Amino acid sequence: MKIAKVINNNVISVLVGQNKELVIMGRGIAFQKRPGDDVDESKIEKTFRLDNKDVSEKFKTLLYDIPLEYMDVSERIISYAKEKLGKKLNDSIYVSLTDHITFAIERNKKGLLISNALLWEIKRIYSDEYSIGLKAIKKIEEMLGITLPEDEAGFIAMHIVNAELNEEMPNVVNMTKLIQDILNIVKYHFKIEIDEESLNYFRFLTHLKFFAQRLFSEKNLESTDDYLYDMVKIKYPDAFVCTMKIKEFIEKTHNYKITKEEIAYLTIHIERVVNRS
């Protein structure tokens, strides 16, 4: 295995197979090395294969400047997130999360703390990802001796959500706000507190995440069959009225027309979460 590019003393890239690029990390792996030299495989600590060429280029650019320890802790957090969630994450998280952690640490060293305005919502809407965020700041403290505030657990959670949904970060922020707005409409309409530990709440939240993703990607559930819509309108009248409030709110604030099928599914989920919490 030969070096294709020296990124810094600790990072190189190599070409394998059909010109597939691997980014390899290891302390001193590129010291006094040049492209074409053999790789000292005994020094390999981490290997990354990023299939997206654009992401791979950004990743290499990022690695020029950051300490090996920052990349190491970021990779461990990403691996933990994949294992915990049991999901594939978009390769872009290697760039976005590593970059975020680097700046968070630098800000912390300078005493510049940024509050997370969506922390309350993140805790409730993305509880699994938030728990990973908490684990992440503990890992950063263990490995780097730097204590980051709870707000950073929320920011890290958002990067994970972004990689799960393959959305741009502004969309994830907007999706989170929209989900919270919908939950508030339900709570105020029925004058209740929803049981956030219930299975029906989890199902409702999952539906809202995909609903919000469809909204911001300008997609919609389509159906030519009005049977389900007509049925829930009669069977769940109060939940249906609540859904119509949500429909009116979304059309006013996001200029998005909700189809009858979307209305039907929202109504069913609202009925479940309100009457079976």
Image (cartoon, helix red, strand yellow):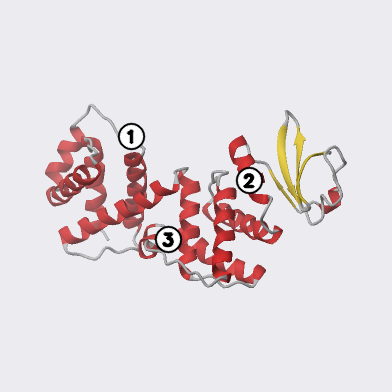
Secondary structure type for disc 2: helix
Of residues 55 and 108, which is closer to you in this image?
Answer: 108
153 horizontally vs 241: left or right = right
Secondary structure type for disc 1: loop
User: Percent position (x, y) of residue 244?
Assistant: 16, 46
Of labels 3 and 2, the one closer to you: 2
Residue 165 lies in quadrant: top left
Residue 8 in the image: above or below residue 196: above
Residue at 39% over, 46% down: 171
Circles 1, 2 touching at the beta carbon (< 8 Å): no
Residue at 61% over, 54% down: 79
Of residues 64 and 169, which is closer to you in this image?
Answer: 64
User: Percent position (x, y) of residue 255?
Assistant: 23, 40
How far separated are the C-alphas under marks 3 and 1?
26 Å
Residue at 45% over, 62% down: 154
User: Percent position (x, y) of residue 17?
Assistant: 75, 31
Which comes before the other along the chain, label 3 or label 1? 3
Residue marked by disc 3: 127
Which comes before the other along the chain, label 1 or label 2? 2
Residue 52 in the image: above or below residue 276: above
Q: Could you tell me the amino acid type at mark 1?
A: Lys
Residue marked by disc 2: 59
Q: Could you tell me the amino acid type at mark 3?
A: Ser
Asked whether the viewer can see residue 251, the reply is yes
User: Percent position (x, y) of residue 176?
Assistant: 35, 53
Which comes before the other along the chain, label 3 or label 2? 2
Q: Could you tell me the amino acid type at mark 2?
A: Phe
Circles 3, 2 touching at the beta carbon (< 8 Å): no
Asked whether the viewer can see residue 275, the reply is no
41 horizontally vs 47: left or right = right
172 horizontally vs 183: left or right = right
Residue 231 lies in quadrant: top left
